[in-house]
Image (spheres, rainbow, N blue to C red):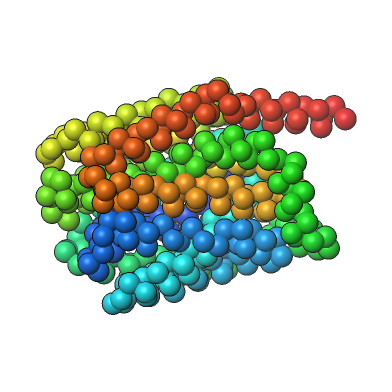
């Protein structure tokens, strides 16, 4: 571990894994009916997905703030800000309130997400990175699944899930306050006197090729990942006319399959390479979305959702691992803020693709569009992005020789 002492995955349980579980649990409670809740404000598909997508704002400022205040403070502030926003959404009565609280929540999520990613990049050796981050992705999936199971017992209320998420966020803040220890590297970074904007521009110039190719791939990946969380509930509700309880059941089963795959994803990434998990995983994912377009019953939609979960689970932690591999050791926070911004741009595009196409045509065409974006991601990572496991191992060997 960079902060002193030997790294073990057990050493991340209280500072990273348990907080990740809690926030994923809260998100899992909210996610199955989030789009239904926002649409209940008498909004079009386009406006519904815009309100969901707007939380992307705040990533670059969060990355700059991270290098000023450190990992621990950023995680703590992020969790507190998120708890305020989720409570506000639960009590909202106007669209303007939803937008404001989504913006606030986006900043909180960005601070939390970038700081935890940077913290893990600081303390995890390259040879352990794939399995450790895949475990992190697996814990997120377990938390999400557990939250989705819990949501089944919350009745028909679309507001109650946000109050559960608030409690989970507050508990996360307490864990961050007591168990995060800033790394030695983190404390040195905070004393750097150079301009953050200048460093950001230098970083962009030095890494623009990788950020262009891998970044476009990640945009496509996050587009279909976020798009599927929106389109499955909307498709189930509007096309097949399922109840909220049935929708929660489908989403829960998809997540169950998803979360079982993370040990395999971590093993593949560390033993064979990152692309060996990315390419087959997202091929299966995109195929599941393509199949969904032809479903017309609870059973067939459930099968498509399970295929989607299997593909996404095979990719557990791949984008975080890739970002950690690519991040320069002297500018981890800034690089990861850009990497997250790129991914969140895709996360914002996903709902907008679903909403705009659904308003112009219908949700079935939205499925085809998301599937096409998924196959594009596969092609980019297969042909244009280098295998970062080999690159990092070669760099590690050179450092040892010198």
The spot of residue 272 in percent (x, y) is: 55, 22
Vertical order, 26 against 218 (above or below): below
Vertical order, 257 against 181 (above or below): above
Q: Going 75% across and 60% down the picture, which residue do you hit? A: 196
Vertical order, 401 against 26 (above or below): above
Question: Which residue is at the front of the view, 119 or 305?
Answer: 305
The spot of residue 61 in percent (x, y) is: 62, 63
Residue 195 seen in the current view: yes
Q: Going 28% across and 32% down the picture, which residue do you hit? A: 290
Residue 2 seen in the current view: no
Question: Which residue is at the front of the view, 16 or 384?
Answer: 384
**Total label count?**
0
Q: Quadrant of residue 294?
A: top left
Residue 376 falls left or right of residue 319: left
The spot of residue 355 in percent (x, y) is: 31, 51
Q: Going 75% across and 31% down the picture, which residue do you hit? A: 396
Q: Quadrant of residue 179?
A: bottom right
The spot of residue 130 in percent (x, y) is: 56, 35
Which of the image's four quarters has the C terminus? top right
Q: Quadrant of residue 263?
A: top left
Residue 270 falls left or right of residue 284: right
Residue 66 falls left or right of residue 351: right
């Amino acid at each position: 571990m960079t902060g002193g002492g030997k790294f073990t995955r057990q050493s991340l349980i209280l500072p990273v894994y348990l907080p990740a579980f809690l926030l994923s649990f809260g998100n899992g409670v909210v996610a199955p009916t989030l789009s239904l809740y926002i649409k209940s404000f008498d909004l079009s598909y386009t406006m519904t997905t815009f309100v969901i997508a707007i939380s992307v704002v705040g990533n670059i400022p969060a990355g700059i703030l991270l290098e000023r205040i450190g990992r621990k403070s950023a995680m703590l502030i992020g969790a507190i800000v998120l708890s305020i926003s989720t409570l506000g959404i639960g009590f909202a009565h106007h669209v303007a309130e939803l937008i404001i609280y989504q913006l606030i929540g986006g900043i909180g999520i960005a601070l939390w997400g970038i700081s935890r990613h940077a913290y893990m990049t600081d303390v995890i050796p390259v040879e352990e990175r794939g399995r450790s981050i895949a475990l992190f992705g697996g814990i997120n999936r377990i938390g999400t699944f557990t939250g989705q199971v819990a949501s089944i017992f919350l009745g028909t209320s679309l507001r109650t899930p946000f109050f559960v998420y608030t409690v989970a966020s507050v508990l996360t803040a307490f864990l961050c306050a007591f168990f995060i220890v800033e790394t030695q590297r983190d404390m040195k970074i905070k004393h750097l006197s150079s301009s953050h904007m200048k460093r950001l521009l230098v970083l962009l110039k030095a890494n623009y090729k990788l950020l262009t190719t891998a970044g476009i791939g990640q945009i496509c990946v996050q587009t279909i990942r976020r798009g599927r969380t929106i389109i499955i509930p909307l498709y189930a509700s509007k096309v097949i006319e399922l109840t909220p309880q049935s929708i929660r059941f489908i989403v829960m089963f998809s997540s169950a399959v998803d979360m079982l795959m993370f040990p395999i994803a971590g093993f593949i990434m560390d033993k064979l390479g990152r692309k060996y998990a990315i390419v087959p995983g997202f091929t299966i994912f995109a195929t599941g979305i393509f199949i969904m377009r032809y479903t017309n019953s609870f059973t067939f939609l459930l099968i498509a959702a399970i295929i989607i979960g299997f593909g996404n689970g095979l990719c557990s932690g791949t984008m975080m691992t890739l970002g950690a591999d690519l991040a320069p050791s002297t500018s981890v926070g800034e690089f990861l803020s850009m990497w997250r911004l790129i991914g969140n741009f895709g996360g914002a595009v996903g709902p907008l693709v679903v909403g705009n196409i659904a308003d112009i045509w219908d949700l079935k065409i939205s499925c085809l569009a998301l599937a096409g974006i998924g196959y594009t991601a596969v092609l980019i990572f297969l042909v244009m992005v280098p295998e970062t496991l080999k690159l990092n191992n070669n760099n590690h060997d050179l450092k040892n020789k010198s």
